[in-house]
Image (tube, rainbow, N blue to C red):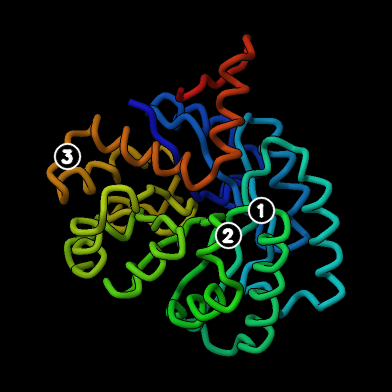
Amino acid sequence: MNWIDTHAHLDAAEFGGDPSQMLAQAYAAGVRSVVIPAVEPGNFAAVRDLAHASGQVYALGVHPLSVERVNEADFSQLRRAVLQARDDPQCVALGEIGLDFFVQGVNRDRQLWWYEQQLRLARELGLPVLLHVRKSQDALLAGLRKLGWAQTGIGGIAHAFNGSRQQADAFIAQGFRLGFGGAMTFERALNIRRLAAQLPDSSLVLETDAPDMRPEWLARAEQLQPNTPAELPRIAQTLATLRGWTPGQTASITTANALAALPRLASWLEMRGATKGKVLRTLL
């Protein structure tokens, strides 16, 4: 079975700057592609270089919790970086962007400014977005509606989704798939598990958010260790159980959804499938 991890911060300090062994473990577990999102201009080069060195894919964007470390002039830097990456087949989205109303003390006006400007840039370039949606679903949806996102056909992924069913349906109507990961593995995560069980098949994608969003077995381990893409198949088993799917069905459906959400990822995997001698093989 083949899996796609649609969200993993492989450049994080927890991985020591060299995730090659971790990626080898993920590949052995059946994970064939990992999307590496940036969070601010300071790590644009790191995620791009890491993706190129490992055969993975990446996204460029400014995370809502990074807005205190950037200014409006940095938007020009983001724009240049995304324009330069437009012809790079491994750049598959704009992200991680969005809003975070859970963490206290982060200026909301700055978050909203960066969110809208990045949405406009993504719409201009036809790039899907990877959305951070913590406690901010309604404000995110308002921004999407303001820009007529549903009419663009661009879509994206609402990462680590944990809103209401009504909000989930609203994101789906805007062309988004919803990301489910380690949080789904906790039996007390009733809302997330209910959504994972009941949403349309075509709306679900899998993610780890490595090194964070540890699944239950890592969160309860005696020695704290980072989450990694190698955990994705076991996380996927929870989704399979909730929906009554076989592991094979789960892999097939979530992979198809990820490729639909990120068309440039599909193109990259086709390109890799036509290139011999690569370490990682294509899903297709």
Q: Residue at x 64, y 37 (%)?
A: 18
Residue 152, which numbered label?
2
Q: Residue at x 58, y 79 (%)?
A: 146
Q: CA distance from mark 1 to mark 3?
A: 33 Å
Q: CA distance from mark 2 to mark 3?
A: 32 Å
Viewer-proximal residue, 92 or 33?
92
Instruction: Say left or right for 118 vs 148.
Output: right
Q: Nearer the viewer, mark 1 or mark 2?
A: 2
Q: Position of residue 155 (x, y in %)?
A: 52, 56
Badge 1 density bin: few <14, some 14–19, many ≥20, Cα 10 Å: some
Viewer-proximal residue, 68 or 4?
4
Residues at badges 1 and 2 in contact (C-beta under 8 Å)? yes
**Of the residues shown, which amino acid type is indicated by label 3?**
Trp
Compare marks 1 and 2 and give the one earlier in the sequence. 1
Residues at badges 2 and 3 in contact (C-beta under 8 Å)? no
Q: Which residue is mark 3?
A: 245
Instruction: Say left or right for 270 vs 86.
Output: left
Residue 126, which numbered label?
1
Q: Residue at x 69, y 81 (%)?
A: 113
